Amino acid sequence: EHAKTSIVYEYPQAEGDPYYPVPRPENAEIYKQYKALADATPGVQFVGRLATYKYYNMDQVVAQALTIYAQLCRKQRLETVAGGQ
């Protein structure tokens, strides 16, 4: 657990918004706008289906999240070492 961690749960259901991207031109345009906002937001990482506008199985999403986590840990360690010198 971390003070800056958010965990979101998805519960599939027949009604409501889908939890996966629906490939349509208008959705791709909306994705580009959200991606630009995300890229301009420092200190925030977006992973998964809606973050990349691609369909992933859950094992792929978990692998993606773990990869991002490892990269962030490496970056933090390097910054800590560089700051201590």
Image: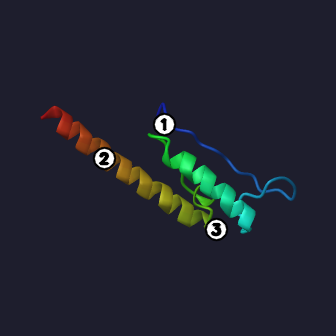
35 to the left or right of 3:
right
Res. 22 in view = no
Q: Are marks 1 and 3 in contact (CB under 8 Å)?
A: no
Marks 2/3: CA–CA distance:
28 Å
Q: Residue at x 55, y 61 (%)?
A: 61
Q: Secondary structure at mark 3?
A: loop
Q: Circle 1: is it few (<14), some (14-19), or many (20+) Cα within 10 Å?
A: few
Residue highlighted by disc 3 = 55
Marks 2/1: CA–CA distance:
19 Å
Q: Secondary structure at mark 2?
A: helix
Marks 1/3: CA–CA distance:
27 Å
Q: Circle 2: is it few (<14), some (14-19), or many (20+) Cα within 10 Å?
A: few
Q: Residue furthest left?
A: 85
Q: Quadrant of residue 23?
A: bottom right
Q: Quadrant of residue 50?
A: bottom right
- Residue type at tag 3: Tyr
Task: Give the x, y percent position of residue 54.
Answer: 62, 66
Task: Give the x, y percent position of residue 8.
Answer: 64, 44
Labelled disc at residue 1: 1
Labelled disc at residue 75: 2
Task: Give the x, y percent position of residue 46.
Answer: 54, 50
29 to the left or right of 51:
right
Q: Residue at x 26, y 43 (%)?
A: 77
64 to the left or right of 81:
right
- Residue type at tag 2: Lys
* N-term mark: 2 or 1: 1
